[in-house]
Amino acid sequence: MKIGILVSSKRKRIWPAEELKKTALSMGYKAVILDPAELTIVIRGKLIDVIHNRTRRSLIEGDSVFLLRRPDYANPELLFYRIDVIRALELSGKTVVNRIEAFLKAVDKIRTSMLLAKNGIPTPYTVVSEEEAPAMRAHIEFGISVVKPIFGSQGKGSVLIENIDSAWRAFRLHRYYRVPIYVQSFVEHRNRDIRVFVLGERVLSAMYRVSNSWKTNISQGAKPMPVKLTSELEEMALKSAEVIGADIAGVDIIESKEGPLVLEVNACPEWKGLQKVTEVNISEEIIRYVISKAKK
Ligand SMILES: Nc1ncnc2c1ncn2[C@@H]1O[C@H](COP(=O)(O)OP(=O)(O)O)[C@@H](O)[C@H]1O
Ligand SMILES: [Mg+2]
């Protein structure tokens, strides 16, 4: 069985991709890191094939399974193309983990918030608009708000807005750059949240992320700490992954005074921090999971 790890760019060294490749090799599988930019889609008659540009070999032939990391893009057409490369693999019968649909749901914070809410999973009060006035009304109602990029991750680009002047400034800039304003009620969490790592239909592991500021991403300097999950939190995380359709998911949960709230579901979660506070070998579990999924 060969494992193709799909990354956004081979020029950057991406820790999870390198780690998965190393682990797959140590477990006796073949593994390659692939960039959708170096793959070609061939549509002929009823068949869809995906060809590697350099080796000119088909990725469809033989036993293989694919692990998706975040596809990168420079413009909308390229983004659609790279998404369609993954779709081509799926359409030709290959197992891709996560499925491209799950990735598309998770990467879009608006869609994630709506799906969580619609499925009865508590999530913070959120307003999204292209215009400043509705965003401003929401900010005034929230008192303190968090403004996030729709496609952001690792806490990058999210800002805490504590007064009306900063709100105006932030919302005007969104308008100027023609990006939607995603404004969310700030939930007091004492600089700590919970990251739950879901694999298949089970919680593989979880951790507290403890920070000295409001952003608790490990990449923003938060420290991983062990956590014992209640069954309520386990169920919440499993259901969140399920509504996104993700086999691999990093679910972010904050503990508010009114109870736990799911912030988002990551379909390409990292586990470097989590690995430090858990006994399960996460990389091995991921490889074992995708292999079993491909054999089904
Ligand atoms: N509404 C909120 N209230 C309080 N803290 C928040 C809120 N939204 C996000 N945060 C903090 O910012 C971090 C990053 O936000 P998140 O929605 O997970 O986006 P990202 O994709 O950048 O990780 C969270 O882990 C949390 O610590
Ligand atoms: Mg997050």
Image (cartoon, grey):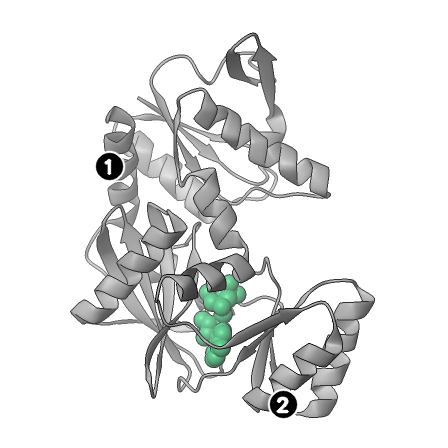
Q: Residue 147 carries which label?
A: none
Quarter of the image with the C terminus is top left
Q: Which is more toward the observer, 56 or 109?
A: 109
Residue type at mark 1 is Arg
Rendered-image quadrant of the N terminus: top left
Between the residue at mark 1 and the residue at mark 2, the CA separation in whole angstroms equals: 49 Å
**Residue 27 figure quarter:** top left
* Residue under the image location 29 percent in, 54 percent down: 198
The residue at the far right in this view is 176
Residue under circle 2?
140
Q: Which mark is residue 288?
A: 1
Residue found 53% across the figure and 44% down from its top: 13
Relative image position of residue 283 (x, y in whole percent): 30, 45
Name the residue located 61 percent from the left edge and 43 percent from the top edge.
72
Query: Is residue 275 in view?
Result: no
Q: Which of 40 and 123 is in front in this view?
A: 123
Q: Position of residue 243 (x, y in %)?
A: 37, 53
Q: What residue type is labelled 2?
A: Ile
Q: Crowdedness of circle 2 by 10 Å Cα count: few (<14), some, many (20+)?
A: some
Q: Is residue 142 above or below residue 272?
A: below
Please rate how many residues cluster around mark 1, counting C-alpha atoms within 10 Å: few if below 14, some from 14 to 19, many from 20: few
150 to 255, vertically: above or below: above
The secondary element bearing badge 2 is classed as helix
Residue 148 in percent (x, y) is at: 59, 69
Q: Is residue 193 visible?
A: yes
Q: In the drawing, does residue 12 fall left or right of residue 291?
A: right
Horizontal and vertical percent position of residue 61: 41, 12
